[in-house]
Amino acid sequence: MRGGTMLHRRWLWMSSHFMKGHSKWDNIKDTKFAAMVNKTKTAEQLMAKMKRIVRTGGPDPKFNKDLVQLQLEYRNANFSDDTFQRALKNVQLQPQKTSKVSVRGPSGSIFIIESESLSQKKLQDFLVTSSDKLGGGFQLSKNDYTRTFEEKGVIIVSAVRGDKTLSLDEMEEICIELNCDDVSEFKEDGEVFYELICVRNRFTPLLDAVKGQGFSVKYSTLELRPVDAIEIERDGIAKITELYQALRENENITQVYANIRPNSIPVRPLRVKSSS
C-alpha cells in the first residue's frame, strides 16, 4: 500500500510454450508475407506475358487464342476474371514504350537490346557499365541495324512430349513435316528445349500444328532474326558469353536480337520466358 493505492506486481514467465507460440505467429506472418510477394511476382509475370501476347496477336480473345489460354493461367493463379479484364484494358490503354539500344561487339557482332521498363538513358547506362565490367569489347552505336534483320516466327517447345523425350533427329523430322525453316536444340536449367523458326506468314499455322501434336509450347512470338548470321571467333565467344550473363541477370531486359549463328554462344541472351 502506497499513498492509499495498492500496487500489485505481476511476474511474467516466458515459458517455452509461450515462446513457441510467439515463434509460430512470426512464422505465420512470414508465410503470409512470402505468399503476398509471390502473388505480386506472379501478377507481374502474367502482365508481362499479356503484353507480349497482345503485341503479337492483338487484344481480342476471339482472334487471339493465346489470350484465352492466358485467362486460364490467371484463374489457376487464383486471379479473378475481373482482374484479367482490367489487366487487358490497361495493356490496351497504356501505349507500349520500348527503349532500344544498338551495340557492336567482337567479330562484327551486332546486338539490338530492348527494355519495356527501363528508360533509354538507364538502358544505355546499364550497357555501358556492363561493358566496362567486362573490360570493353562492346560499343554503343547510334546506327539502326534493323535492316540487317527480318521478322521470323519463333516457337520454343519442351523436348518432352507425353512420356517421351524427343531427340534432335526426331524433332528435325517433325519440323520437315511441319514446314519449319530451322530447328535448334538448347538447354536451360538442365531442361532440353527446341527452337523452331519459320517465315512470318507461317507462324500462326505452325503454332497451331505444334500445339495440335501435343507439344508443350514455352514461348511463341514474332522476332527479328539476322538475314546473314555470322560466326564468332573463339576469343569473342567468351566476351559475348559474359555479356549474355549480364543481360540474363537483369529482369528489365525484354529482348535481345543478335546477328550470330544459333548455338554459337553456350548460353542464350535471355532466360526462356513463357508467353503462351
Image (cartoon, helix red, strand yellow):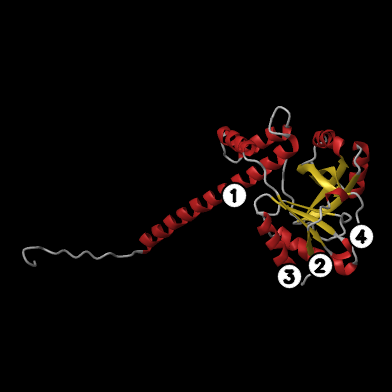
Q: Residues within 10 Å of mark 1 (few under 14, many from 20)?
A: few
Q: Residue at the location (68% across, 55% down)?
A: 120
Q: Residues within 10 Å of mark 3 (few under 14, many from 20)?
A: few
Mark before the other along the chain sequence, 1 or 4: 1
Mark before the other along the chain sequence, 2 or 4: 4
Contact, mark 3 vs mark 4 (Cβ under 8 Å): no
Q: Residue at the location (38% across, 62% down)?
A: 19
Quadrant location, the C terminus: top right
Q: Identify residue type, mark 3.
A: Asp
| Residue marked by disc 1 | 41
| Residue marked by disc 4 | 231
Q: CA distance from mark 2 to mark 4?
A: 14 Å
Mark before the other along the chain sequence, 3 or 4: 3
* x then y, percent, for residue 259: 86, 55
| Residue marked by disc 2 | 239
Q: Residue at the location (74% across, 62% down)?
A: 245
Vertical comparison of 136 with 213: above or below: below
Vertical comparison of 4 with 275: above or below: below
Quadrant location, the N terminus: bottom left
Q: CA distance from mark 1 to mark 4?
A: 38 Å
Mark before the other along the chain sequence, 2 or 3: 3
Q: Residue at the location (84% across, 58% down)?
A: 110
Mark before the other along the chain sequence, 2 or 1: 1
